Structure formats: C-alpha cells, structure tokens
Image: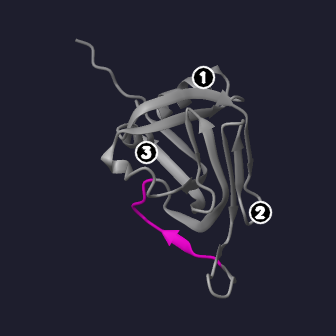
Amino acid sequence: MAVAIATKWTIKGRVLIACNCDWPGAIHEGNGIGTALVDDRADAKQREALVTLVEGSAGGPWGIFRKTVTTLHGPTFVRYEANFSGELPEFKAGDAVECKTTFIRNPVTSATSHPRIVLPEGLILKDGALLASKRFVVRDGVKYDHSGQYAAFGFFYYTGP
C-alpha cells in the first residue's frame, strides 16, 4: 500500500484583515459562508497550489478556516490591486472585494491612535497595526458592507503541513 506524503510548503507576505467580528456569529461556531479569490496573474502551477491552500487541503490557517465554512464560493480568479506602501493600506480584488483603511480615532478628541497587536501564537499574524476599515465591501457569493469596523495590517509567515 502506497503512503501519500504531503508536500511541505511555505508562504509569506503581508495581510490586510477587515471584519465585523460579531456578524453573523462567532466563526468558531461554524456554518459559515465564504468566498475564495486568487490573483489572476498566478501561472498554472501557482493557481493549483493556491487553490489547494484556500480549499483547506494543505493545512495551515486555511485548513482551520475551511472547517468553519459550510459553503465556499470559488475559487474565483480576479485581478488583485494592493497599496501597502503608505501608512494606510488598501486592497481591491476585482469587483469582489474593496478594503480601504483609516486610523482609529479617540472618540472624545478625534486624535488619531496607532495601536499595535503582538500575538506570538497568533493564527493570522504575529505582529500588526490596528486600524479601522474606512470601506470594506464584499460582493462575490457573499455580500456585505462592514465599513467602519475592525481592520489590521501586518506580515504573515505560514508553513505546512
């Protein structure tokens, strides 16, 4: 009997997170609906690897999140546009996702605040800047507008299996 050996993989980059952490319920409760978008500039081999990751078959954070999603739309291939060079990152994935960030403001003085989060055992990121979503809209199988909610930006480094 042949034994399948899982391919080891590493992926690193920058991550922009946005969500409404109470909509429609806690992610760990499951029964979620999600969408997977892959940059259309990926070549055939990269697409195959990225699809394997986002579908959860290769472990890593996607393997964990996939267990919380009952319905996964996609993967759909769209053009990614990201601007991470300034203080306020923004991201667009075709017409499916748009995320622009802004600083968190003191509710009394309106002064900008620049908090950071450090989570050595964090799943998505280990160290990042906390922001607010100036605009966060998804319209691909899943449709919502959670502008004005939580956002974070940082670096990720994942390995598997």
Mark 3–mark 2 Cα distance, whole angstroms, equals: 27 Å
Residue named by callout 3:
61
The residue at 39%/51% (across/down) is: 25
User: Which of the pair 96/114 is nearer the observer?
Assistant: 96
Residue 148: numbered disc: none
Specify few, some or many for label 1: CA neighbours under 10 Å numbering under 14, 14-19, or 20 or more: few
Q: Quadrant of residue 134?
A: bottom right
Quadrant holding the N terminus: top left
User: Which of the pair 17/147 is nearer the observer?
Assistant: 147
Q: Amino acid at mark 1?
A: Lys
Q: Is residue 119 located in the magenta-colored stretch of the structure? A: yes
Query: Residue 67: x, y in percent?
Result: 35, 38
Q: Residue furthest left?
A: 1
Q: Earlier in the sequence, mark 2 or mark 1?
A: 1
Q: Quadrant of residue 84?
A: bottom right
Work out whether residue 161 can be spotted.
no
Identify the magenta region: 113-123
Residue 45: numbered disc: 1
Helix, strand or loop at label 2? It is loop
Query: Residue 131: x, y in percent?
Result: 62, 67
Q: Earlier in the sequence, mark 3 or mark 1?
A: 1
Task: Look at the picture and state if 129 lies above or below 12.
Answer: below
User: Which of the pair 138/57 is nearer the observer?
Assistant: 138
Residue named by callout 2:
86
Q: Amino acid at mark 2?
A: Gly
Q: Residue furthest bottom?
A: 109
